[in-house]
Amino acid sequence: MSTPLVIRDRNTMRNLILTNQTMGRRIGFVPTMGSLHAGHTSLVDRAMAECDDVVTSIFVNPSQFGPQEDFERYPRDFDADFNLLAQHDVRWIFAPDVHEMYPPGDSTRIEISGPAEPYEGQLRPGHFSGVATIVFRLLQSTPANTVYFGAKDWQQVLVVRQMVRDLGLDVEVMTCPIVRDKDGLALSSRNAYLSESERTRAQTIYAALQQAEENWCRGLAIDKIELKVRDMLSAREIRIDYADIVHDESLRKISEVSRNTPAIFLIACHVGSTRLIDNILLPSQT
Amino acid sequence: MSTPLVIRDRNTMRNLILTNQTMGRRIGFVPTMGSLHAGHTSLVDRAMAECDDVVTSIFVNPSQFGPQEDFERYPRDFDADFNLLAQHDVRWIFAPDVHEMYPPGDSTRIEISGPAEPYEGQLRPGHFSGVATIVFRLLQSTPANTVYFGAKDWQQVLVVRQMVRDLGLDVEVMTCPIVRDKDGLALSSRNAYLSESERTRAQTIYAALQQAEENWCRGLAIDKIELKVRDMLSAREIRIDYADIVHDESLRKISEVSRNTPAIFLIACHVGSTRLIDNILLPSQT
């Protein structure tokens, strides 16, 4: 347990990181939008195990929310976040305000095609441009050796990796496993929106993914695996945005003949008015 | 006179710069598309005066040319460029091929709004996104202390400055004055496209800008100054894309009441099939 130092401005943050790196310390960075849960702290713990110091950012990034989305009501609780990060020995909390990250007159955005185009890219226009733009800026402010992301936002990880590769950024990108609640629901700040009965229905998402994994391993046809998942979700009145088996990097649909390639089952769906995403990696069948 | 080292790959280039900076040397960078003339060497000489070492890149960047533009026929003469840079004591020439700068699968672009929107931005869709994307990547490969641009491409300088500010890049951007031939024509690699008679007609561009400057200083109304320039150009069968007096940073039109703000006269026009741009700064009238 240590008391993290809270930093609000980019230059102070950047200079702190650079100074510590000059002294030979490896810095791990966990970017978050706050409202922290055990998914986030698993990233912090991993960073702590691999690095000398950990910095966590707390910034609800307006540019990755669509106009009809939940930017305004996105849960925020800085004091709770601070205490949790203190328990996990985070050294610095970078908590800029919106004007610090997007000063007046700001007009530069990073646009990714390729992995940013399908699925979330299609359903949330501008979302990944907002993600790439803020991750770039956070990495400028916190030029860490390694940055940690959770596998729940699988497509986001692919987009960040693509940007880091294309722009030649000097940071290692680590992906950490999804953390689930006892009932199987993937941890998400948005779970707070669920009513008790919605929460119960939402358990079906992971149950469906587990069934899909079993069926995949049994060799069931891909379209049948997908259909069974859709049926399970629909039976609980969960509205599906997508529920597809795809290549885990290209996000292209997998055909029967190529099912020996690394695959992932991606789901986005609505439980009541809450949109949830989840996924499961499907073991290669070679 | 020294013999420049030619470097083709990004990592070698980056490591060379970083190593020399660690030794305390200041590095100046002059990005070019080759086909070098005295405009470019004026940038090199300025960089040489201000820095310990100068690196020049030669890269005809496909992503800043539109599909109907002159990427294929853009003049290229590496040997002549090499000799000229040797005469000006450039230490390194960074000359990557297209795949080095845009590897297969590349999908990240930098998009600028604000200063990139009017004028060239409107007439050459995607041009400034291509410029920003390549300048960013060149700066990753050649992380110089200072980068030098010519004032002829005024809007380009504004776009680069905007990107450097918004992305917090650690480089100083210097703008150097336009270099003109004896007849007044601003030096440009594209002047090579002009026939002898077109070349004579093209002299009118600078003559018109000089007349505009005089009329500006005399206090002539802005629309009249612009009209006289248009008339002069049209009289020589020079087709005008734009010929406007604008604020030198916002590129917004100047009204009579605000003519004490820093202004610039921007021209883009066609002499035969060759598109030329030029500009002149208009002294503030306070």
Image: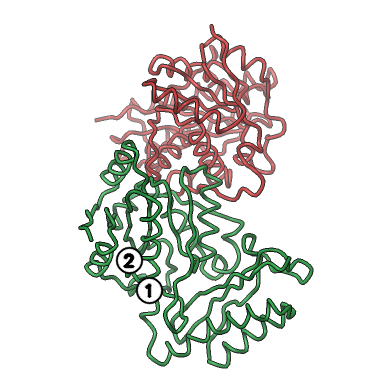
Chain colours: A green, B red
Q: Quadrant of the C terminus of chain B?
A: top left
From the top left corner, tell me how far across and down residue B87 is, in percent: 55, 9
Note whether residue A96 is visible: no
Q: Which secondary structure lies at badge 2?
A: loop
Count of numbered labels shown in the rendering: 2
Which residue lies at the image location 29% right of the left edge and 41% below the top edge?
A15
Q: Which secondary structure lies at badge 1?
A: helix
Crowding at label 1, few (<14), some or many (≥20) Cα neighbours within 10 Å?
some
Q: Are marks 1 and 2 in contact (CB under 8 Å)?
A: yes
| For residue B271, above or below residue B106 | above
The numbered disc on residue A189 is: 1
From the top left corner, tell me how far across and down residue B79 is, in percent: 67, 16
| For residue A120, above or below residue A10 | below
Residue closest to the far top: B1
First reached walking from the N terminus: tag 1 or tag 2? 2
Residue at numbered disc 2? A34
Q: Amino acid at mark 1?
A: Ser
> Label 2 lies in what chain?
A
In front here: A111 or B188? A111
Which residue lies at the image location 62% right of the left edge and 30% below the top edge?
B96
Q: Disc 1 versus disc 2: distance between alpha carbons?
A: 8 Å
From the top left corner, tell me how far across and down residue A55 is, in percent: 32, 53
| For residue B133, above or below residue B12 | below
